[in-house]
Amino acid sequence: MSVQSDKWITKMAKEQEMISPFEDKQVRSGKISFGVSSYGYDARVSNEFKIFTNVNSEVVDPKNFKPTNFVSRESSVCIIPPNSFALASTVEYFKIPKDVLVICLGKSTYARCGIIVNVTPLEPGWEGHVTLEFSNTTPLPAKIYANEGVAQFIFLKGDSKPNITYADRDGKYMRQKGVTLPKI
């Protein structure tokens, strides 16, 4: 496997619509940066947030997750309560080639504030808006800025296509739009 450069990412975004909308340079100007970088793409978080709440004293169960565990907000910022988390999605829609695996890492600007961004790998053939999880590990409220950079996606090209891609097995998160809650 090899890590793909800005040249490859830009070519695939423009020719194959791998990332849409696509920024072909790093955008900064008073924002947490987003856009193509040397060996990755810094994606933005949308303005739709689902903030975890314990108001109903529910048990968090991935096999029986209740939407009432969240408060939904559309806003230019999201305030995550102390020691809690929120879900959001990327502004960008991704279409992952069948011979590529994408790894996502949170941006250091958030990590240095105790805010952890988690995303599972984007598998070959998967497409959709990426659901992002933000964990506030601090004892204070934490702020996330909509339409700004939150995580870097690194594209690893395999030496061959897998026997079965995410699209081939009709994965449960295929073509998701917006924030998508856990499914079984």
Image (spheres, grey):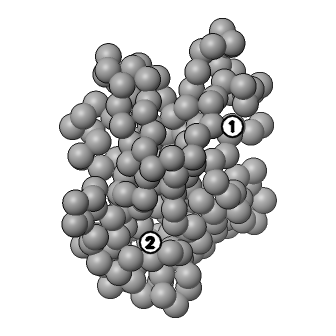
Residue placed at 24% from the left, 34% from the top?
A: 113
**Closer to us: 164 or 69:** 69
In the rendering, which numbered label is found on residue 146? none
Determine which residue is flagged by label 2.
157
Q: From mark 1 to mark 2, how far is it between C-alphas?
A: 28 Å
Q: Is residue 14 above or below residue 162?
A: below
Residue placed at 48% from the left, 81% from the top?
A: 13
Q: Are marks 1 and 2 in contact (CB under 8 Å)?
A: no
Left or right of 85? Residue 69 is right
Residue placed at 27% from the left, 59% from the top?
A: 31
Circle 2: element type: strand
Left or right of 70? Residue 86 is left
Q: Tell me if mark 1 has few (under 14), some (14-19) or many (20+) residues whose alpha carbon lies within 10 angstroms of its own.
A: some
Determine which residue is flagged by label 1.
182
Q: Tell me if mark 2 has few (under 14), some (14-19) or many (20+) residues whose alpha carbon lies within 10 angstroms of its own.
A: some
Q: Is residue 23 visible?
A: yes
Left or right of 7? Residue 14 is right
Q: Which percent across, then down, holds residue 161?
A: 58, 73
The residue type indicated by label 1 comes to: Pro
Q: Which percent across, then down, holds residue 181?
A: 68, 39
Query: In which quadrant is the C terminus drawn?
Result: top right
The residue type indicated by label 2 comes to: Lys
Residue placed at 64% from the left, 54% from the top?
A: 178
Dot 1 or dot 2: first in sequence order is 2
Query: In which quadrant is the N terminus drawn?
Result: bottom left
Between marks 1 and 2 in the image, the one whose residue lies nearer the viewer? 1
Q: Which percent across, then down, holds residue 82?
A: 39, 20
